[in-house]
Image: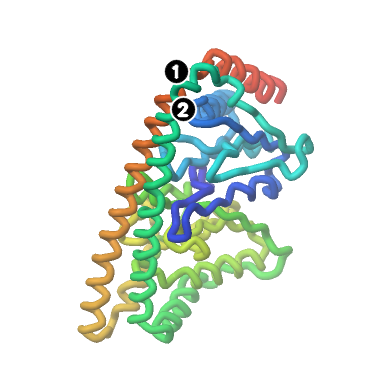
């Protein structure tokens, strides 16, 4: 279904990665792990490869970088059983068995190291400034997550349980098939806390339920929904919540082109939503005035903290851009281009 997504997220716990799952993805028979530092052309190579694959008529999935959504951290071409991924920090990927379905593609060899040595103090300073921005960003996200938990406590467990049980019956709506071999499950992110703001990506074409869930109460509901469909034999994609990365924010059924997505007020909702379910209204109905006022104040504080986190990530990206500017003049881009063309020729003209 979805053709663009994240496999990593900035979360209250720090950076959370799902990149290792590429090596267990049954669709992927060959994984190329791209290595190399800043500014050496990793993202450009993957963008070129993705565009060339589409020229040949292959479907392409693009994996965006959560620290720079304009940059690619990976490309998957399911029909060829092929994936390329940026395997450098913070989403380090190493082959389980090198040469046996997974191997390296080293772009670091195109650095002219002699030209970089005089720049070492400036590069170190920019890297330290970049790294220093992530502590405050993640601190803001932790504080925002604590406020979200406090709002759920004001609602109460019994209220949440009653509302979500009723919502589950409405979402299943008698459509669940019976029996079958349990389906597979894979995880990704369709939303992210990024330097460009709080982003939401499309779940793809098909029937979409948008579940208004500003209180973060619907994670268990969607986890149960996914388990039901998996037990009935459907392959399931779980879109995880970057504000609570162990919690499900979306369920996608690729074969049926159906999806259910929780919508947080701070994130833009899916434009193609055909059906809507308002958990927030059901949870807030009959809430005492004092509790409602307290929740409104907590929510406003939470949104300010999310804005602060984005601001720190924006500063981190500015420092990262400087690092790339320092590196780029010392990169043999003609060599990177030749490497890219050879790779495209190998992958596509022989397929």
The front one of 299 and 112 is: 112
- 46 to 291, vertically: above or below: above
Judging depth in this view, the residue of 51 and 228 nearest the camera is 51
Residue topped by disc 1: 329
| SS label for mark 1 | helix
Task: Say which residue appears at 69% left-offset and 46% top-offset.
Answer: 23
For residue 27, above or below residue 120: below
User: Residue 286: horizontal and vertical position, in percent?
Assistant: 27, 85
At 72% across and 22% down in the image, what residue appears? 350
Separation of residues labelled 1 and 2 (CA atoms): 14 Å
The residue carrying pointer 1 sits among few (fewer than 14), some (14 to 19) or many (20 or more) residues within 10 Å by Cα, namely some
Q: Is 17 left, or right, of 131 in this rendering?
A: right
| Image coords of residue 200 (percent x, y) | 39, 50
N-term mark: 1 or 2: 2
**From what the image shows, is residue 155 above or below residue 63?**
below
Q: Quadrant of the C terminus?
A: top right
Please state which of residues 258 and 86 is positioned toward the viewer in this rendering.
86
Q: Categorize mark 2 by other alpha carbons within 10 Å: few (<14), some (14-19), many (20+).
A: few
- Residue drawn at x 52%, y 38% as measured from the top left: 73
Task: From the viewer's perspective, tell me whether residue 295 is left or right of residue 130.
Answer: left
The quadrant holding residue 102 is: top right
Residue behind mark 2? 120
* Location of residue 155 with respect to 277 vertically, above or below: below
């Amino acid at each position: 279904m979805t053709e663009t997504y994240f496999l990593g997220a900035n979360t209250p716990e720090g950076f959370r990665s799902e990149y290792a799952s590429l090596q267990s993805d049954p669709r992927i028979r060959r994984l190329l792990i791209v290595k190399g530092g800043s500014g050496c052309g990793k993202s450009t190579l993957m963008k070129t490869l993705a565009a060339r694959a589409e020229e040949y008529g292959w479907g392409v999935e693009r994996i965006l970088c959560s620290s720079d959504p304009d940059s690619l951290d990976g490309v998957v071409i399911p029909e060829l059983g092929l994936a390329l991924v940026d395997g450098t920090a913070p989403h380090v990927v190493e082959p389980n068995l090198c040469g046996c379905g997974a191997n390296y593609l080293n772009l670091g060899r195109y650095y002219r190291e002699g030209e970089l040595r005089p720049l070492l103090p400036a590069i170190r300073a920019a890297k330290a400034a970049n790294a220093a921005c992530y502590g405050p960003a993640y601190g803001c996200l932790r504080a925002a997550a604590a406020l979200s938990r406090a709002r759920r406590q004001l609602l109460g467990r019994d209220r949440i349980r009653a509302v979500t049980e009723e919502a589950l019956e409405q979402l299943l709506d008698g459509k669940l098939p019976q029996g079958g071999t349990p389906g597979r499950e894979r995880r990704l992110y369709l939303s992210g806390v990024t330097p460009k703001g709080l982003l939401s990506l499309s779940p793809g074409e098909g029937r979409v339920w948008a579940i208004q869930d500003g209180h973060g109460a619907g994670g268990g509901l969607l986890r149960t929904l996914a388990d039901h469909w998996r037990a009935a034999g459907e392959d399931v994609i779980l879109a995880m919540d970057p504000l609570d990365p162990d919690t499900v924010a979306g369920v996608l059924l690729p074969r049926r082109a159906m999806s259910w997505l929780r919508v947080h007020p701070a994130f833009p909702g899916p434009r193609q939503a055909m059906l809507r379910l308002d958990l927030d209204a059901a949870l807030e109905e009959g809430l005492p005035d004092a509790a409602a006022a307290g929740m409104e104040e907590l929510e406003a504080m939470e949104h300010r903290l999310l804005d602060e986190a984005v601001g720190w990530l924006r500063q981190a990206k500015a420092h990262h851009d400087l690092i790339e500017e320092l590196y780029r003049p010392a990169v043999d881009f003609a060599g990177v281009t030749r490497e890219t063309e050879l790779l495209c020729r190998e992958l596509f003209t022989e397929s």
